[in-house]
Amino acid sequence: MNKSELAHIRGLDEQGNINKPFDTKKKPKVPWRTLLANSNMWYIMAAYACYNYCLYFFVTWLPTYLVDYRHFSLVKMGLFASLPLFAGVIGDTVGGIITDKILEKTKNTKFARKVVAITP
C-alpha cells in the first residue's frame, strides 16, 4: 500500500499528515444519554421489538404448530409457513413505493415516512 492509498483510507489531519490507525483494542464509549433521550431512537427500538417478536413467532412457533397440530407434511408446512414472510416482503416493497409517491407529492420526508409506518 502506498502513501496516497493510505491517505485516502485514513484521511488527513489539519496539517496534511496521514491520520494514525484506529486502536481496535480500545472500546468506543456509547453515548447512552443522547441515544435514550432521542424520541426517534425509541420509535426504532419499538419497531425492532415488534419485528423481532413477529419474526420469532413465524420462524419457531408456526412451523411447529402446522406439523404437530395440523399434521402438515414438511413440504406443505414449508409452503404455508413461508406465506406470511412472503406477504411481509410484498408489504415492505409496496410501502416503499407508496412512501416515494407521497414524498414526490408533498416534498415532506418526515410526513411520507410516518404515514406509511403507521398505516395498517
Image (cartoon, rainbow, N blue to C red):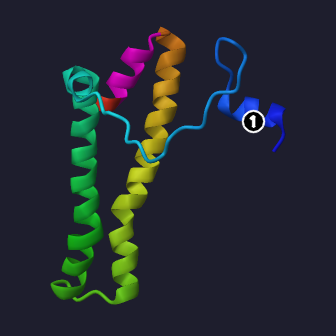
Asked if 115 appears above or below 22 in the picture, the reply is above
- Quadrant hosting residue 65: bottom left
Asked if 45 appears above or below 41 in the picture, the reply is below
Which residue is farthest left?
A: 69
Q: Residue at x 68, y 21 (%)?
A: 12
Taking depth in this image into account, of 15 and 101 the one nearest to the observer is 15
How many numbered circles are shown?
Answer: 1
Asked if 107 appears above or below 17 in the picture, the reply is above
For the record, the magenta segment spans 108-116
Q: Residue at x 54, y 15 (%)?
A: 104
Taking depth in this image into account, of 78 and 18 the one nearest to the observer is 18
Give the image location of residue 114, x and y in percent: 33, 23
Asked if 110 appears above or below 35 in the picture, the reply is above
Residue 120 in view? no
Taking depth in this image into account, of 97 and 4 the one nearest to the observer is 4
On the image, numbered disc 1 is attached to which residue? 6
Taking depth in this image into account, of 109 and 68 the one nearest to the observer is 109
Instruction: Please check the rendered image and state whether residue 51 is part of the magenta-colored stretch, yes or no.
Output: no
Quadrant occupied by the C terminus: top left
Give the image location of residue 85, x and y in percent: 38, 60
Q: Residue at x 73, y 16 (%)?
A: 16
Instruction: Please check the rendered image and state whether residue 114 is part of the magenta-colored stretch, yes or no.
Output: yes
**Crowding at mark 1 (Cα within 10 Å: few <14, some 14-19, many 20+):** some
Q: Residue at x 24, y 85 (%)?
A: 67
